[in-house]
Image: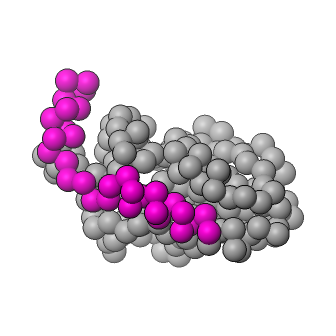
Amino acid sequence: MLDDLQGIQERARCLYNEAEVEAALDRIATEIGRDFSSSNPVVLCVMNGGLIMTGKLATRMNFPLQMDYLHATRYRDRTRGSDLEWKRHPELVLTGRAVVILDDILDEGATLAAIIKHVKALHPSRLAVAVLVNKLHDRKTQGVTADYVGLEVEDHYVYGYGMDFKGYLRNAPGIYAADPQDCD
C-alpha cells in the first residue's frame, strides 16, 4: 500500500484546498458557539475520522465545554463499509447535558445513525451533529442529517482532514476525491 500512495495522490482530484476547509471550520465553530456557548456542552469526537476536525474546532470554540470521544466503525481501513463495530463508548455522563457530535463525513449515515441512537438513549438535554463533509447522494439512512455541515461533495470516495483512504491519507491538507480506479 505504501508504494501505491503517491500514485493515489497524483490521480486524486482536490475538491477543497486547505484554506477552504479552514474557512468551513471557522463557520462551523461560529455556528456551534452561537447555539451552544451558554449550555456547557459535551463535545463528542467520533474516532478516528473526527479527530482532526475536533482538534481544529476545539481551539475555535471559546466557551466552556467538556470533550469526550467514542469509536464506532464500519470501514476498518477499507473503502466499503460492513457491520458496525463499537470500540469505545463515551465516558462522561451525558444525561441532562447538551451534546454535540463531531464527525468527518455524513455519507450513507449508518454509523452516525447508530451513534445518534446510542447517545439519545443516554438522555441528553439537547443533541446536535456537526460534520465536516456531507456527501450528496440518495442512499442516506432515513432520518439522518447533520445540524452543521462544513462542505458538500458529490458522490466520490473522499479523503483528507480526517477521512482516510484504506487507513492512510487522513492527514492530507485538503479534501480529495480518489480516482475510481483506486477504489476497489
Residue 166 place in picture, x, y as percent: 33, 37
Is residue 93 rendered to the left or right of residue 45? right
Q: Which residues are magenta?
A: 1-30
* Residue 58 among those drawn in magenta: no
Residue 175 place in picture, x, y as percent: 34, 53
Is residue 27 rendered to the left or right of residue 95? left
Assign the C terminus to one quadrant of the image. Answer: top left
Residue 10 place in picture, x, y as percent: 16, 41
Please tell me which residue is depicted at 72% across the width and 58% down the height of the picture. 62
Position of 48 relative to 143 (above/below):
above
Please tell me which residue is depicted at 32% across the width and 59% down the height of the picture. 16
Evaluate whether residue 57 shows in this view: yes
Please tell me which residue is depicted at 46% across the width and 57% down the height of the picture. 22
Residue farthest to the top, as pictured: 3
Residue 12 place in picture, x, y as percent: 19, 48
Assign the N terminus to one quadrant of the image. Answer: top left
